[in-house]
Each structure stands twice: as structure tokens, then as C-alpha cells.
Image: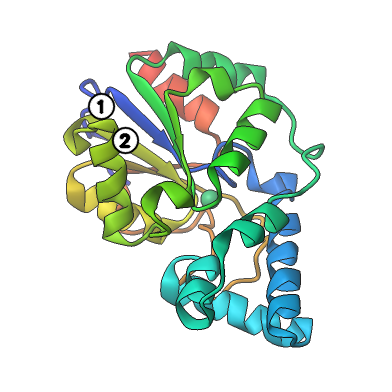
Amino acid sequence: MKQKSNLSNINNWIFDLDNTLYRADANFFSQIDRKITKYISEYLKIPEFNARLYQKEFLRDYGTSLSGMMSVHNMDPDEFLEFVHDVDLSSLTPQPKLRNNLKLLKGRKFVFTNGSRQHALNVTNHLKLNDLFDGSFGIEDTNYNPKPNENAYTIFCEHYQVDPKMAIFFEDSPRNLIIPKKMGMKTVLVTSDVDWSHEPQSTRPAGNDTIADWIDFKTDDIESWLTEHILSK
Ligand SMILES: [Mg+2]
């Protein structure tokens, strides 16, 4: 792992939401994962087993299952997003130390999720982090162009006038960091050994053993990473 990157000029802190701003071991995202299966099953009138195959295939090929359903089946996104993000937040616990560290960061902070903007607001409110962010960007804000597609990041940076060379991106999905690195951002992979997804390798969230040359740092704990690399400097 390259640990020498200079981070002193960073003034845009960009965070993915799910399994990044809260730990994957909260086992929260599996609720959304199952609701996506249910929605596709009911929408296409097929058994859940088959719906799940489409869900994962679309995730792999289109960036999100939603984007695949929109492209292939012309599905309207609004009802889908409302349904899949209507979940119980109680397994997520606010982390006062993480809040404190985020608050100490100099510059602007953003949430950039492939879920809906409302989902980002629901989760950050529940985690008592919402007031710290200068913006929450959801899938509707990129005109349904999900990460890892390049368009998603370009739209984000234009919207907030972010200079990628002064930005850092935190993400649990390795492939979602390829473009940020190419654009000049620093990249932090947030890892977990909990595989909630049972995804194929290309879309599975990163385990602690993930190595890729577009990843500058990796951590299974953002709060201590910030203490070590930023706040103690
Ligand atoms: Mg994520």
C-alpha cells in the first residue's frame, strides 16, 4: 500500500454512503439487497430466484440493478427507489467519534451514493452526521448514471465545482474508485471481511485482502484512518 501520498491539499472529502459511512458488519444493506430482489420479482412477474440473477447481472453490467432495469425493461425509477430504501434503520448506530473526526476536516464534505438522495438523508440523519455535509448526491442527481461510469463523477464534480486534484474519495466498492483515481483524486478503499452480498467477484465489496493500483489507501475503520493520516498531522 502506498502511504506516502501528500494529503495536505485535500479540501473536498467525498464519501460513498452504504457500507462506507457505516460499517458493513451492521448488516443493514442486506435489507435493501433483498428489497431490490422483491421489487424486480414483482415488476417482471418472475420468481425471486430468477429476479436475483437479473439483479446481480445488472449490477455487474450497468453499475446498479436500477440502471439495468431502466435500460432493459424501461422501468420508472421513482417507485423502485422509494420501495427499496424503505428500510429499518435501527441496526445503524451513531458513532460520536466518527462525527467528531469528520467535523474536524477542513473543507467541504459530500455524500455521493448510487442510492437515492432521500436514502442518503435518511441514513445520515439517523447517524447524526447530516449537518456535517455540504451536499448529498444521489442517483437521480447524476440523471441515473451510476458509479462506476465516468459520467457520474463528471456530473458530480461539475455540480459542486470540485477540483479532483484537491479531493479524496472513500468507497467500499473497488471498481467505484477507478475513475476518481484517473481524474486525479486520492482514493481510500473501505474494507470489511463481512460479505453481505454474495456477489460475483467483480462487484463484491472489498475484503481486507484487496489490492489494486488505483487504491491509495485502505482501511476497515474511517475514524481511525482520519486520526492517523489527517488529524494527527
Ligand atoms: Mg457502498
Mark 1 = which residue?
Answer: 7
Nearest-to-viewer mark from 1 and 2 = 2
- The residue type indicated by label 2 comes to Ile
Q: Residues within 10 Å of mark 2 (few under 14, many from 20)?
A: many
Q: What residue is rendered at 39% in x and 35% in y?
A: 14
Q: Nearer the viewer, residue 153 or 83?
A: 83
- Report whether residue 226 is seen: yes
Residue 188, how many percent across, how many down? Answer: 39, 42
- The residue type indicated by label 1 comes to Leu
Using the image, determine if residue 55 lies above or below residue 129.
Answer: below
Mark 2 = which residue?
Answer: 168
Q: How many numbered callouts?
A: 2
Type of colouring:
rainbow
- Report whether residue 201 is seen: no
For label 1, the SS is loop
Residue 70, how many percent across, how many down? Answer: 50, 72
Using the image, determine if residue 182 lies above or below residue 9.
Answer: below
Q: Nearer the viewer, residue 207 or 107?
A: 107
Q: Quadrant of residue 170?
A: top left
Of callouts 1 and 2, the N-terminal one: 1
In which quadrant of the rendered image does the C terminus lie? top left
For label 2, the SS is strand
How far apart are labels 1 and 2 at the CA level?
Answer: 9 Å
Using the image, determine if residue 38 lies above or below residue 206.
Answer: below
Q: Is residue 82 left or right of residue 130?
A: right
Residue 124, how many percent across, how many down? Answer: 61, 30
